[in-house]
Image (tube, rainbow, N blue to C red):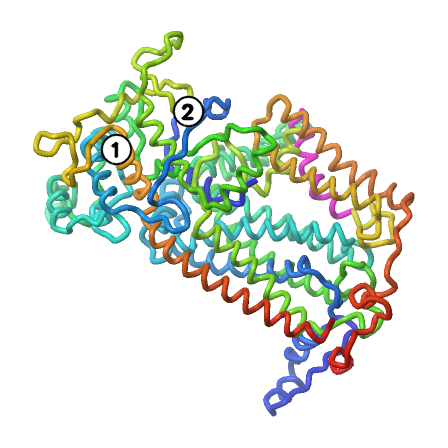
């Protein structure tokens, strides 16, 4: 993995024996115990661990739910209700899984916003970032597929609306879109066949996510973590070992996150119909972009572009300063970008009529302008503000040396 | 933008939602509805067993002729967290219904009295029969009705996100109950200039104000010894019956409600204490690093 050498010392004879054959413990120790983490990480950096937790929770609860769920158009909804009513703690497992999907997206949006704000997509972290975009796409696919499984009214409309997006391809090559839609459905209409394949894929994709997460973490450990200053680790003083420091912080962050999670699982789970057909909240910004474009094909292209454009931002951003903290103009453009995404999210949940469409168009234009104009231009013309000389200086002040004898990091 | 739309939709998908109110909702015509106080609201909310018993009586007297309750078994009426009727009484009640069973050893289907393990038999053989009886209208099954309905927001656009946030923080989940109560008590005289379709009834809570269901709760529908009261002495006014039956339907939609909130309290307490301990552990570990 990284250039960093593991300080692992096998203790027992068994550990020695194993270390000579498969140095798994050496690798784990090097990557997750004495791995150097920037000493100035804030709580936004705990979301990587939180997301891993979410993935595990979704897989574990999902496997149990799959034991009781029946992927059949006539029986799916009843089987979900049976889980809620008759399966032991089925209500709890199902709540955790359904709320868990939302918490997963909540965490991933914070994680992505963190990456944007502190420039975690810039060299040398481009591959790490692109793997993240891929994970986001996989999550969206998995979330959508899972949302269809209860096969009630909302699921049914969801499937119909989303799969029908592909029929817009008919306007490029007549018949192509229709063929693709039929191929997705497995027939001439949405049916049990469709539900079955969606279930199969919903079970498959999380394990693909696990694989890409492994690559994501690998890439992270090759280049090391970014940090709020965006500076590289230069001396031992700039970092603390991952265990116990970063681990303790991660676990506390996770502890707070789980409280929020539990609140939604047990108490704030209103279970009411939205008055009109809307997708899940986490799709709403992209749904707003889809509907902001008057042409169907154009809307579909805009929606997918809105996600895929993230792949290119390591090269669209021309500034060599990573952290928005030291970029006086870009910082405000970025805050307005965050506001635009939230606004699009709100508008995506509103009927596509009148003033809502006009506003959605305004924010859509800004969404793309931010990446295509602001990132390249502001990067060139902006004068960055004064930066600390090192990570250590940014937290410890002046000399960049820890105060007090107990603080000597040499003993790590 | 709520975190919980997922839950909402998952659950909401439940029922045959008649197209008309759906469209009326979409057009934003739903009238403003007042929120009610419920014993099952909030962090410490629990169903009131007596109210659920009264509510079941109202369902049986006033709703069951037209509306099924297909996801409730007779045994659910005995289980904790629900109305908790006396088991023998429910056995007796079940025996007054006939269900089809079989085939027997001769290969014939046969009828037998219902048992605790049976579902409450539906009032119709199928949807077609229901529609033919009701002039084309389909009285929906009520098992999930309290979860399949909700309130519409009527404030300003800018306050909406904060309104959603407030409801999340407060754990507001009684939108369905509030709507149903408003609907059941919403049969009032129609405004003079309001045009009605033949055979429809005016209701101030129903989106579009025209509902095929005639007023289901009438004074005197429930009587004990000739007086309009329940057996426990509670006066059986329309408001009271509406309140009770809505509580009962809320339970029918979410029979694990009490268990969920009871466990939730302990889980929250455990997590809060754990988080505090984790915070101090973190602080101690980082002491040497600052």
Task: Give the mark nearest the N terminus, 1 or 2.
Answer: 2
Q: Which mark is in front, 1 or 2?
A: 1
- Which residue was labeled with disc 1? B240
Q: Which quadrant would residue A232 be assigned to in this image?
A: bottom right
Badge 2 marks a residue whose secondary structure is helix
Q: Is residue A402 above or below residue A317?
A: below
- Stretch of the chain drawn in magenta: A293-312
Residue at 46% x, 54% y: name it: A96
Q: Are marks 1 and 2 on the same chain?
A: yes
Q: Which quadrant would residue A227 be assigned to in this image?
A: bottom right
Badge 1 marks a residue whose secondary structure is helix
With B274 as the anchor, is A134 left or right in this view? right
In which quadrant will I find the N terminus of chain B? top right
Name the main secondary structure of what is drawn in magenta: helix
- Which residue was labeled with disc 2? B21
**Residue A346 visible in the current orientation:** yes
């Amino acid at each position: 993995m990284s250039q960093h050498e593991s300080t692992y010392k096998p203790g027992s004879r068994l550990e020695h024996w194993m270390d000579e054959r498969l140095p798994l413990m050496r690798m784990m120790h090097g990557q997750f115990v004495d791995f150097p983490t920037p000493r100035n990480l804030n709580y936004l950096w705990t979301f990587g661990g939180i997301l891993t937790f979410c993935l595990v929770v979704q897989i574990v609860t999902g496997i149990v739910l799959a034991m009781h769920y029946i992927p059949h158009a006539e029986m799916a909804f009843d089987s979900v209700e049976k889980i809620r009513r008759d399966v032991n703690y089925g209500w709890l497992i199902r709540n955790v899984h359904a709320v868990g999907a939302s918490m997963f997206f909540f965490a991933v949006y914070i994680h992505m916003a963190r990456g944007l704000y502190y420039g975690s997509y810039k060299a040398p972290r481009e591959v790490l970032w692109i793997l993240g975009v891929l994970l986001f796409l996989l999550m969206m696919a998995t979330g959508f597929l899972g949302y269809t499984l209860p096969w009630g009214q909302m699921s049914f409309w969801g499937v119909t609306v989303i799969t029908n997006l592909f029929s817009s391809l008919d306007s490029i090559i007549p018949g192509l879109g229709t063929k693709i839609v039929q191929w997705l459905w497995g027939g001439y209409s949405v049916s049990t066949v469709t539900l079955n394949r969606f279930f199969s894929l919903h079970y498959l994709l999380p394990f693909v996510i696990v694989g890409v997460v492994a690559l994501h973490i690998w890439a992270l450990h090759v280049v090391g973590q970014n940090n709020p200053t965006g500076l590289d680790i230069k001396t031992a003083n700039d970092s603390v070992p991952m265990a116990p420091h970063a681990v303790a912080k991660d676990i506390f962050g996770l502890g707070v996150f789980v409280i929020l999670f539990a609140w939604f699982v047990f108490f704030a789970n209103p279970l009411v119909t939205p008055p009109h057909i809307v997708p899940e909240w986490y799709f709403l910004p992209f749904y707003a972009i889809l509907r902001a474009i008057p042409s169907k094909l154009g809307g579909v292209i805009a929606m997918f572009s809105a996600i895929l454009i993230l792949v290119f931002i390591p090269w669209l951003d021309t500034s060599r300063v990573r952290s928005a903290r030291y970029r006086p103009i870009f910082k405000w453009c970025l805050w307005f970008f965050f506001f635009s995404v939230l606004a699009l999210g709100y508008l995506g949940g509103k009927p596509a009529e009148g003033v809502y469409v006009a506003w959605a168009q305004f924010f859509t234009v800004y969404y793309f302008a931010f990446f295509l104009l602001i990132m390249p231009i502001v990067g060139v013309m902006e004068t960055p503000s004064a930066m600390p000389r090192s990570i250590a200086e940014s937290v410890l002040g002046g000399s960049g040396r820890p105060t007090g004898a107990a603080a000597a990091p040499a003993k790590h | 933008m709520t975190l919980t739309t997922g839950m909402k939709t998952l659950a909401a998908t439940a029922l045959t939602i008649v197209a008309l109110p759906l469209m009326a909702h979409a057009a934003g015509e739903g009238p403003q509805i007042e929120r009610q106080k419920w014993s099952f609201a909030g962090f410490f909310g629990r169903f009131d067993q007596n109210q659920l018993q009264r509510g079941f009586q109202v369902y049986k007297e006033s709703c069951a002729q037209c509306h099924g309750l297909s996801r409730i078994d007779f045994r659910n009426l005995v289980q904790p967290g629900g109305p908790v009727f006396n088991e023998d009484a429910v056995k007796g009640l079940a025996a007054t219904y006939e269900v089809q069973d079989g085939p027997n050893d001769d290969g014939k289907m046969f009828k037998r009295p219902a048992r605790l393990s049976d579902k409450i038999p539906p009032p119709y053989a199928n949807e077609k029969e229901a529609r033919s009886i009701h002039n084309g209208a389909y009285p929906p099954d009520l098992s999930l009705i309290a979860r399949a309905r909700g309130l519409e927001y009527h404030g300003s656009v800018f306050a909406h996100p904060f309104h959603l946030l407030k409801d999340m923080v407060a754990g507001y989940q009684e939108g369905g109950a509030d709507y149903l109560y408003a609907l059941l008590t919403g049969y009032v005289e129609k405004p003079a200039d309001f045009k009605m379709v033949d055979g429809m009834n005016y209701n101030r809570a129903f989106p579009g104000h025209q509902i095929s269901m005639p007023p289901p709760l009438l004074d005197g529908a429930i009587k004990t010894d000739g007086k309009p009261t329940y057996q426990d002495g509670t006066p059986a006014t329309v408001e009271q019956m509406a309140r009770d039956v809505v509580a009962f339907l809320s339970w029918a939609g979410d029979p694990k409600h009490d268990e969920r909130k009871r466990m939730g309290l302990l889980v929250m307490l455990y997590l809060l204490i754990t988080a505090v301990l984790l915070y101090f552990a973190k602080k101690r570990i980082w002491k040497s690093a600052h």
